[in-house]
């Protein structure tokens, strides 16, 4: 059952049992009351370890959380780390020189200001500057993280980025692959990087993704068709 | 500006690269002006202009005041532009002394006020002692490029749409009639200036631009925010339907061939012709709509009275 | 590692002087005081500071002094004090339709309540901080609230501010005389009729309010001081010089010319003045109240002595006349009242940023405000 | 204002020039050698301007530090006594002054090789002692000269001039009387090319006449470039002569 | 009341609010990096800006900002975003009242539109605030959302904001009561009661608007 939650509402949870709080639910540090703080759809799962509660909602401003895959722009370089922006005007996060595969004191990464990186958030304390890493710390491998060369980047809403990254049933990527070959990196900070073999395809992908973000899933196929066709026609 | 929007090298290269292949991100051609949407509010002189995602609101108001001592026959006309973080977090509150914001307000000022688009002598009530002060408040709501063009359209459309209360003068005594008592009177508009902004990109290196003969520079009309952030130079021309250049501003930036600039001016003319007609027509329609409404109301009143 | 360093260190509880604690943790200091039954200022919960008023201690506009103060007050409340100086100006009425007779006719006799028939003062509040600088937000907000308050209490009718200028004439013998329309004889009537101006003037009142040694919220002090000062306003009579009336000026621009008449200045008479007519029943006084929860966990003596004492219910109390930094930062729910001793209210503002504001609390505050207004009104 | 004859039927202007003649152009560089790294003094007609270039030097504020290129600042000080009537208020924070400053920064940003001086700041100070029309053009010339004197790498000269349009006749290098009486355009031309770095038109000019105005402006600007070039070469010769003496 | 969320796309949250003759746009951006002087070590800093429809901002707008901040601060979970900034900008398009005399309608319009913009920006809030503007006329009648003429003829004007929780059906606190004019204790309590009733019914509209927004965002 879908239940609309507005901040201040009571959540349908059993407080005598364990509760894990997801996005949109907050425990007030003073009163210790668990309450919804965002408007959205209530989502409660009761598992073995207790209840997991979160609110489903969409937003634009990204707040770092551990484990998130993000696309960031290098905005500064310091003695031992880069400063990276995950969203314009947000507090910057840091990317240590040691957070790269095979990193050592001697072997420094060679990123430049303005470069795009794909990374994972490794610490995110709300009082401190968050940190990201370009290495899978369990394997020490790059695992697809690191510099994103060329291509194009676009900003979408956070919900859309999450759908694209996590929802296997979300058809957009599969549909895109029917039109052209592409490389893609999806950051849950709402930045999507895409690279194809030529400008025209990238442009079509760029427009299609942005259009699809504003329309329900069932219209995606026709949006793609239209955009790719329009660009093909423009050539002739 | 407080802080800038961050743009990655990859994105910048892609956008300029696409321009070289004559593509723009939003699929427009280089010479295509975005569709202008003009909406009027409930009051006279309340205009909202939208160009793509760019939104500008203008409110015209007036009050009786004293004229300047050295200009006893003229009313006052003031345009105030103030940006807020509403248009985008890159804008700062109140302090609009930064380069871009000064240029925006100066160009609007030159295009409309200095060019005498509003008949200020018509604002005089009693020479030397009473006159109308007309004020245009420009509110930047959403910035996706083209603030100058949109604001200029909004201000001039606002002035054309605005009506000031009717007055009766008995010697020194002035009676201002409320809007519901007497039909208000429109302002005197002497010409309709419209701004068109070109953004220039240099696809080659600087040397070629300055020394070379190739003139390969790219000029696009009505840039979006991203294009504005990446452009190398900008030109704003203001024209009216009388084929007069009201104002031209190319404050530095990428050096451009004089002939190419001339070409821009000619391109701009066809655009301003179209927009001028659009404004005139929309105001006509809005007035008609109001008339209808008013007629409806008065007939109802008449019925009530009987 | 050195053995000595590893030795255990005895942790001593730190004892802080009350004033030090008040700086470091105003909230804790506030709660400690409350749990003992009084406030950081050592006042009781519902105890007000005493207010002292000095009337007419500042000189005013007259032949003897060259200042232009037409009303003033000096008010002290606790450590804070406040000087209000009211100055006046005369402006030409541009509100062309705002004629009082016109309004009465247009709106009918019942329009006495109509807000456009009342005026306000233009206050500028300065809270002295011992340094120069731009206006703070507090100064601007207090100024605006004072303006709104005076306007909406309908204290000053526009009619009382209308200027009825006299004429200064010089007769054949060189004798200078000022004739006012309300005290003229028959022959003068003929004289002044010609000068009956088409223009309308009115007084505007400006108030400069300076607050010294700020210890807490300043609005109430400023309001009360302003009310005392308004009560003491005496408006000087104004006149026009006969010779100036004839003055005509020809202006020529761009080949056009026009004659501008009535460039005369209006002058004030330093000798004659009359008190500003107020709607006396609308004089009111301000007071404020905070609502806060007493947090017994913060008190010093619960843990040891009264172990068996039942857990105290959190208690909500009303604090009258907020003062001191610790109260100002700790109290988030505030009731501010402007009213008179008869329970007639002019302004009530409730901000419920913290503890719950209950009707009972508001009722209690209203009751206290009546007593306070009674006390303050006796000082005029 | 009395009716002045701006342009006589014989083709003479108020100060006796013909339509295509420049005003007296007197420039000298290295005038304030101890005060700055580069300086110039320029008299263009009755415009009297001196320009100081300080830098490239370390920025005083961290915010001015740019990793990739030098930061350029221009301050224009229009003195209160620069016009016939002394102005009551300072021109410092006027919008017009701010506009001129921004325009000048943007004009020279593209012409100076700022990428050669990363992490530094270049301050340009201009003092207008006297003004008589066509101010922005003169400011451009002053900066060009001073920057060359300071030895800052640049791509080419930029020369500025203003052109008025009297009915159908374009008048080159106008003074303030002419400026007030007609509409005019200010140009900043790059070297001997036809490229405009700066173009300002502030009053109505018929669209079909604009090309004409630009053409005469460009020609005039080229002439000014030559005059500046002459002065620079004269100054250089003098220096060479001085150094060879030793 | 008509509200459109997501009206502007360059900010994180926005709303276009229209109620009778009041029209306000609100934008919210945050949490973002504050300037050094704005930063608070333990909580979110709020920057509230109000721009009038006509003229330049004066002390009147500063006072509005102050009142809005007083209402909005307690409903935002400010300790969730230490050392961050939230910019709230309000542009009044139509005030619906004579600016020199009143500010009730604008104040309520600003507060209501801010609540929607905050929700749109997904800033954590612990409850919603619902505001009502009222006028008491000479004959003792109460008018909600009075017109300019009614305001001018009124005896007293009241701005009320309630903090609502639990399905937005329970009043948690009175966030603001701002009354001017000539009234007494019993009128004040009647106003409070009447306003509360109206706010609770208005809250239903609030929830409906929020529901449409959520459904649109999540394509449901």
Image: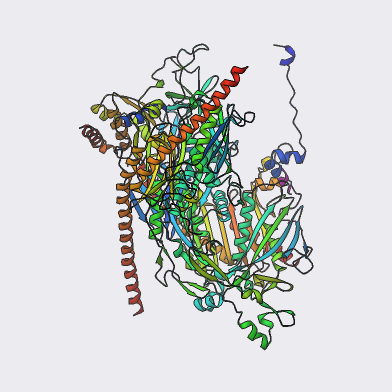
What predominant SS class does the magenta segment belong to?
loop
In the rendered view, tell whether residue C340 sits above or below residue B141: below
Extreme residue in the bottom direction: C186
Q: Is residue A120 left or right of residue D91?
A: left
Query: Where residue A174 sits in the image (x, y, percent)?
Result: 27, 28
Question: Going 72% across and 11% down the picture, which residue do you hit?
Answer: C2
Tally of marks = 0
Instruction: Indicate whether residue C47 is drawn in magenta.
Output: yes
Q: Is residue D158 magenta?
A: no
Residue B70: x percent and y percent? 55, 61
> Residue A79: horizontal and vertical position, in percent?
55, 19
Q: In terms of depth relative to the viewer, which is nearer, C10 or C271? A: C271
Work out whether residue E21 can be spotted. yes
Quick check: C33 above or below C160?
Answer: above
When asked about the image quadrant of residue A59, the answer is top left
- Inspect this view and state whether residue A34 appears: no
Q: Quadrant of the N terminus of chain C?
A: top right
Q: Is residue A127 above or below residue B155?
A: above
Span of residues in magenta: C32-49
Q: Nearer the viewer, residue D233 or D198?
A: D233
Q: How is the image coloured?
A: rainbow
- Given residues C142 and C256, the one toward you in this image is C256
The image quadrant that residue C346 belongs to is bottom right
* Residue C365, picture quadrant: bottom right
Instruction: Identify which residue, C81 or D154, lies in the foreground.
Output: D154
Quarter in which the C terminus of chain C is drawn = bottom right
Measured from the top left, where is residue B82 in percent x and y? 49, 48
């Amino acid at each position: 059952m879908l239940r609309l939650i507005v901040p201040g509402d009571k959540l349908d949870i059993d407080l005598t049992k364990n509760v894990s709080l997801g996005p949109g639910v907050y425990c007030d540090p003073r009163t210790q009351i668990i309450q919804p703080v965002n408007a959205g759809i209530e989502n409660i799962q009761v598992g073995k370890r207790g209840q997991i509660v979160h609110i489903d909602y969409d937003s634009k401003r990204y707040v770092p959380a551990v484990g998130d895959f993000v696309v960031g722009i290098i905005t500064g370089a310091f003695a031992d780390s880069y400063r990276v922006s995950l969203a314009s005007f947000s507090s910057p996060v840091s990317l240590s020189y040691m957070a790269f595969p095979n990193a050592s004191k001697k072997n420094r990464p060679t990123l430049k200001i303005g470069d795009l990186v794909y990374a994972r958030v490794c610490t995110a304390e709300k009082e401190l500057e968050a940190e990201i890493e370009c290495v899978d710390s369990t394997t020490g491998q790059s695992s697809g993280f690191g510099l994103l060369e060329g291509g194009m980047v676009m900003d979408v809403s956070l919900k859309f980025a999450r759908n694209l990254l996590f929802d296997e049933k979300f058809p957009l990527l599969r549909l895109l692959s029917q039109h052209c070959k592409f490389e893609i990196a999806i950051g849950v900070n709402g930045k999507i990087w895409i690279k194809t073999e030529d400008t025209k395809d990238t442009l079509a992908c760029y427009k299609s993704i942005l259009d699809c973000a504003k329309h329900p899933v069932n219209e995606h196929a026709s949006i793609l068709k239209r955009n790719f066709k329009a660009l093909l026609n423009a050539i002739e | 500006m407080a802080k800038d929007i961050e743009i990655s090298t990859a994105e910048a290269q892609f956008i300029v690269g696409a321009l070289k292949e004559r593509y723009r991100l939003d699929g427009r051609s280089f010479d295509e002006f975005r569709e202008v949407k003009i909406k009027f509010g409930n009051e006279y002189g309340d205009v909202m202009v939208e160009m793509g995602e760019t939104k500008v609101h203008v409110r015209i108001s007036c009050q009786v005041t004293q004229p300047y001592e050295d200009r006893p026959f003229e009313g006052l006309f003031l345009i105030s532009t103030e940006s807020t973080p509403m248009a985008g977090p890159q804008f700062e509150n109140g302090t609009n002394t930064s380069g871009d914001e000064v240029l925006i307000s100066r160009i609007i000022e030159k295009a409309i006020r200095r060019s005498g688009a509003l008949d200020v002598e018509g604002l005089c009530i009693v020479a030397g002692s009473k006159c109308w002060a007309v004020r245009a408040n420009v509110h930047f709501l959403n910035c996706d490029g083209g603030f100058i063009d949109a604001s200029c359209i909004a201000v001039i459309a606002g002035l054309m749409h605005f009506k000031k209360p009717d007055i009766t003068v008995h010697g020194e005594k002035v009676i201002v009639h409320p809007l519901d008592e007497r039909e208000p009177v429109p302002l005197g508009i002497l010409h309709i200036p419209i701004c068109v902004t070109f953004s220039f990109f240099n696809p080659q290196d600087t040397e070629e631009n300055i020394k070379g003969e190739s003139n390969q520079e790219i000029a696009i009309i009505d840039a979006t925010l991203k294009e504005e952030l990446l452009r190398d130079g900008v030109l704003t021309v203001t024209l009216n339907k009388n084929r007069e250049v009201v104002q031209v501003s190319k404050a530095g930036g990428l050096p451009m061939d004089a002939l190419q600039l001339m070409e821009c001016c000619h391109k701009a003319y066809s655009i301003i012709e179209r927009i001028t007609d659009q404004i005139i027509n929309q105001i006509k329609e809005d007035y008609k709509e109001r008339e209808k409404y008013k007629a409806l109301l008065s007939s109802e009143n008449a019925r009530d009275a009987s | 590692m050195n053995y000595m360093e590893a030795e255990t260190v005895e942790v001593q509880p730190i004892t802080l002087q009350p004033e030090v604690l008040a700086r470091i943790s105003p909230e804790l200091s506030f709660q400690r005081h409350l749990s003992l039954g009084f406030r950081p200022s050592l006042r009781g919960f519902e105890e007000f500071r005493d207010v002292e008023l000095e009337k007419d201690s500042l000189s005013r506009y007259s032949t003897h002094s060259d200042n232009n103060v037409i009303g003033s007050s000096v008010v002290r409340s606790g450590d804070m004090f406040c000087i209000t100086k009211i100055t006046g100006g005369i402006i030409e009425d541009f509100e062309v339709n705002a004629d009082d007779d016109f309004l009465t006719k247009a709106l009918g006799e019942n329009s006495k309540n109509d807000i456009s028939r009342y005026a306000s003062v233009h206050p500028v509040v300065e809270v002295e901080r011992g340094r120069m600088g731009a206006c703070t937000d507090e100064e601007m907000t207090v100024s605006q609230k004072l303006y709104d308050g005076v306007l909406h209490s309908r204290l000053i009718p526009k009619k009382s501010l209308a200027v009825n200028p006299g004429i200064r004439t010089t007769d054949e013998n060189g004798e200078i005389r000022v004739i006012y329309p309300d005290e003229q004889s028959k022959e003068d009537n003929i004289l002044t009729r010609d000068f009956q101006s088409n223009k309308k003037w009115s007084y505007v009142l400006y108030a400069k309010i300076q607050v010294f040694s700020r210890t807490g919220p300043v609005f109430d002090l400023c309001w009360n001081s302003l009310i005392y000062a308004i009560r003491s306003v005496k408006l000087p009579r104004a006149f026009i010089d006969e010779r100036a009336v004839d003055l005509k000026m020809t202006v020529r621009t761009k080949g056009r010319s026009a004659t501008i008449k009535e460039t005369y200045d209006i002058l004030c008479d330093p000798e004659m003045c009359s008190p500003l007519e107020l709607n006396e029943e609308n004089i009111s006084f301000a007071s404020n109240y905070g609502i806060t929860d007493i947090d017994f966990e913060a008190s010093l003596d619960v843990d040891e002595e009264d172990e068996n004492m039942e857990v105290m219910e959190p208690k909500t109390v009303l604090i009258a006349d907020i003062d001191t930094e610790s109260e100002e930062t700790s109290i988030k729910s505030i009731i501010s009242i402007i009213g008179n001793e008869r329970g007639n209210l002019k302004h009530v503002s409730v901000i419920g940023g913290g503890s719950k504001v209950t009707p009972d609390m508001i009722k209690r505050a209203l009751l206290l405000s009546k007593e306070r207004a009674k006390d303050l009104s006796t000082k005029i | 204002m009395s009716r002045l004859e701006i342009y006589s039927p014989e083709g003479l202007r108020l100060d006796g020039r013909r339509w295509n003649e420049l005003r007296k152009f007197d420039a000298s560089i290295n005038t304030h050698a101890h005060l700055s790294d580069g300086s110039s003094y320029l008299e263009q007609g009755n415009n009297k301007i001196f320009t100081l270039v300080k830098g490239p030097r370390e920025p005083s504020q961290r915010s001015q530090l740019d990793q990739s290129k030098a930061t350029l600042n221009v301050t224009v000080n229009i003195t209160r006594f620069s016009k016939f009537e002394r102005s009551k208020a300072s021109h410092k924070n006027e919008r017009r002054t701010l506009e001129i400053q921004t325009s000048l920064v943007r004009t020279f940003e593209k012409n100076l090789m700022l990428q050669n001086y990363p992490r530094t700041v270049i301050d340009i100070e201009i003092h207008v002692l006297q003004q008589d029309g066509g101010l922005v053009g003169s400011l451009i010339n002053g900066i060009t000269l001073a920057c060359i004197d300071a030895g800052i790498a640049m791509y080419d000269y930029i020369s500025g001039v203003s052109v008025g349009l009297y009915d159908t006749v374009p008048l080159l290098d106008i003074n303030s009387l002419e400026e007030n009486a007609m509409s005019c355009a200010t140009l900043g031309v790059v070297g001997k090319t036809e490229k405009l770095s700066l173009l300002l038109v502030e009053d109505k000019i018929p669209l079909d006449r604009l090309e004409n105005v630009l053409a005469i402006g460009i020609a005039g600007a080229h002439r000014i470039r030559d005059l500046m070039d002459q002065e620079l070469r004269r100054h250089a010769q003098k220096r060479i002569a001085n150094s060879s003496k030793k | 009341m008509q509200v459109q969320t997501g009206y502007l796309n360059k900010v994180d949250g926005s709303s276009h609010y229209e109620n009778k003759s009041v029209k306000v746009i609100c934008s919210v951006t945050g949490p973002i990096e504050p300037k050094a002087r704005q930063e608070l070590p333990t909580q979110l800093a709020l920057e509230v800006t109000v721009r009038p429809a006509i003229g330049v901002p004066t002390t009147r707008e500063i006072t509005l900002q102050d009142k809005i901040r007083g209402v909005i601060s307690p409903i935002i979970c400010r300790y969730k975003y230490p050392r961050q900034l939230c910019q709230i900008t309000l542009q009044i398009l139509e005030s619906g009242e004579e600016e020199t005399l009143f500010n009730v309608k604008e104040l309520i319009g600003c507060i209501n539109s801010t609540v929607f913009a905050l929700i749109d920006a997904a800033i954590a809030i612990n409850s919603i605030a619902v505001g009502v503007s009222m006028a008491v006329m000479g004959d003792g009648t109460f008018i909600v959302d009075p017109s300019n003429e009614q305001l001018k003829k009124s005896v007293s004007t009241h701005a009320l904001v309630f903090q609502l929780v639990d399905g937005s059906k329970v009043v948690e606190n009175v966030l603001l009561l701002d009354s001017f004019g000539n009234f007494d204790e019993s009128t004040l309590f009647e106003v409070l009661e009447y306003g509360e009733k109206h706010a609770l019914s208005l809250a239903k509209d609030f929830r409906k608007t929020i529901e449409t927004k959520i459904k649109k965002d999540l394509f449901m």
